Amino acid sequence: MKSIVYTLAALAVVAAPVASAAPDPHGNHGRPQPGNPHPGWGHDQGNQHRWNKGERMGYNDWRGARPVDYRRYRLSRPPRGYEWRQQGNQFILAAVATGLIASIVASR
């Protein structure tokens, strides 16, 4: 019985560094990458880009998009950590921390 416990403990010690060495899903390992100084954010696309759900806005794209009052435009209330922005004729619901787009609504 003791040998099983010792074996499991040894495996846990060996497996811990391997699990922590896994890269993050964005491949930046928490460091800025060349051409993208804001980790977690996408690359800047410019004002004319047609955004899609699931894309990540670039940091400068996010800052360049105008924040909007969702009540004024009859948009759904954003979840905590998200905000509606307008760029061109698109209303974009995206995460404030990373620019991950959750929803798009086209204006007329």
Image (spheres, rainbow, N blue to C red):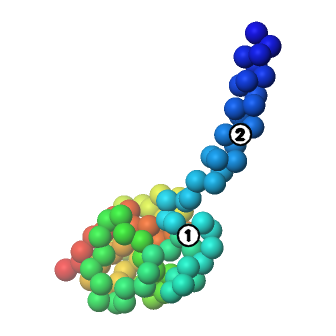
For residue 48, side relative to residue 10 (left or right): left
Q: How many marks?
A: 2
Image quadrant where one finds the C terminus: bottom left
Element class at badge 1: loop
Residue 96 at x, y percent in the picture: 52, 70
Image quadrant where one finds the N terminus: top right
At 76% from the left and 28% from the top, the residue drawn is 9
Residue 17 at x, y percent in the picture: 70, 48
Mark closer to the observer (1, 2): 2
At 56% from the left and 79% from the top, the residue drawn is 33
Crowding at dot 2, Cα within 10 Å, few <14 / some 14-19 / many 20+, comes out as few
Point out which mark residue 28 bears: 1
Residue tagged by mark 2?
14
Residue 95 at x, y percent in the picture: 48, 66
- Pick the residue in front: 71 or 76: 76
For residue 10, side relative to residue 31 (left or right): right
Q: Are the residues tagged 1 and 2 within 8 Å (C-beta)?
A: no
Residue 85 falls in image quadrant:
bottom left
Vertical placement of residue 108 versus 29, above or below? below
Please name the amino acid that badge 2 sits on: Val
- Pick the residue in front: 3 or 51: 3
